[in-house]
Image (cartoon, grey):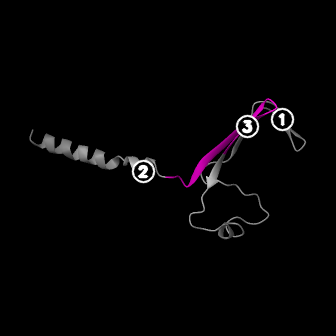
Amino acid sequence: MSGIPARVAILLGLAALSTPPRHVDAQIRASERGSVAQTIDGTTIRIEYGRPRLRQRTTAEIFGKEVTWGEVWTPGANRATSFAVDRDVTINGARVPAGSY
């Protein structure tokens, strides 16, 4: 019976070590999320996007090297950009039904 308290102490110690400190959750992600919503003529448009960080790099180090000139660039390391409208819209002559994309 004397070994049970030692086992409990070891298990509690392991549980404490496996729980990340609170400040870890507060750290900035690789690419923070941003969003914007606007109602125009009764239609609400919402865009959620990644906000890339330079991390001590210059734009010249990113554009032309990491992002090839003339190609489509997808900013945001974590998730793709989303676009939502609550009514059918026309963009550059193309009809886009209401929904999330």
Report x, y in % for residue 13: 24, 47
Bin the neighbour count of mark 3 within 10 Å (Cα to Cα): few under 14, some 14-19, many 20 and up. Answer: few
Q: Quadrant of the N terminus?
A: top left
Residue at (9%, 41%) from the top-left corner? Answer: 2
Quarter of the view holding residue 53: bottom right
Relative to 59, residue 12 above or below:
above
Residue at (75%, 30%) from the top-left corner? Answer: 86
Q: Is residue 88 left or right of residue 93?
A: left
Magenta stretch containing residue 33, yes or no? yes
Report x, y in % for residue 96: 83, 37
Mark found first going from the N terminus, 3 or 2: 2
Q: Which residues are magenta?
A: 28-48
Residue holding disc 1 = 89
Residue holding disc 3 = 38
Q: Is residue 99 left or right of residue 4?
A: right
Residue holding disc 2 = 24
* Foreground residue among 41 and 80: 41
Q: What is the three-letter code of the residue carrying label 3?
A: Gln
Pointer 3 with pointer 1, Cβ within 8 A: no
Bin the neighbour count of mark 1 within 10 Å (Cα to Cα): few under 14, some 14-19, many 20 and up. Answer: some
Mark found first going from the N terminus, 3 or 1: 3
Secondary structure category for the residue under label 2: helix
Distance from Cα at disc 3 to Cα at disc 1: 14 Å
Magenta stretch containing residue 90, yes or no? no
Secondary structure category for the residue under label 3: strand
Report x, y in % for residue 58: 64, 68
Mark found first going from the N terminus, 2 or 1: 2
Report x, y in % for residue 32: 58, 50
Q: What is the three-letter code of the residue carrying label 1?
A: Val
Q: Nearer the viewer, mark 3 or mark 2?
A: 3
Q: Quadrant of the C terminus?
A: top right
Pointer 3 with pointer 2, Cβ within 8 A: no
